[in-house]
Image (cartoon, grey):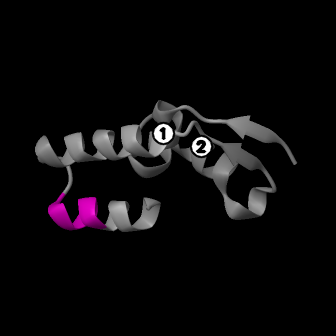
Amino acid sequence: MSIFFLDTSALAKRYMPEKGTKWIRQLAATNSGNDIFIAQVTPVELYSAISRQYHDNQITLLQLKLFRKLFT
């Protein structure tokens, strides 16, 4: 078991596929035994990043709503 602090850009990789996504998903998997810590502001920053994806037509409104439900 390890302890990791993920900043917003690292945590975003868990939800938005990009370079490093596979590693972050493995690191944060519930069966990994790892503890993941984030800053108090991270949920706000992450939702902002996901919202930008919607406004740039990279995800649908349904995907945005599902993310919000998942992360809140």
Residue 57: x and y, percent?
Answer: 12, 47
Q: Quadrant of the C terminus?
A: bottom left
Q: Position of residue 35 (x, y in %)?
A: 76, 49
The residue nearer to you, when weighing 40 against 24, is 40
Q: Residue at x 46, y 32 (%)?
A: 9
Count of numbered labels shown in the rendering = 2
Image height of 52 relative to 30, above or below: above
Q: Is residue 5 magenta?
A: no
- Alpha-carbon distance for marks 2 and 1? 16 Å
The amino acid on which the numbered mark 2 sits, given as a three-letter code, is Ile
| Residue positioned 44% across, 41% down in the render | 12
Disc 1 residue type?
Answer: Thr
| Label at residue 24 | 2
Q: Position of residue 47 (x, y in %)?
A: 34, 47
Left or right of 37: which side holds 66? left
Residue drawn where x is 45% and y is 46% of the image: 43
Query: Which quadrant would residue 59 be assigned to in this image?
Result: bottom left
Q: Residue furthest front?
A: 40
In the rendered structure, the answer to whether residue 32 lies left or right of residue 25 reads right
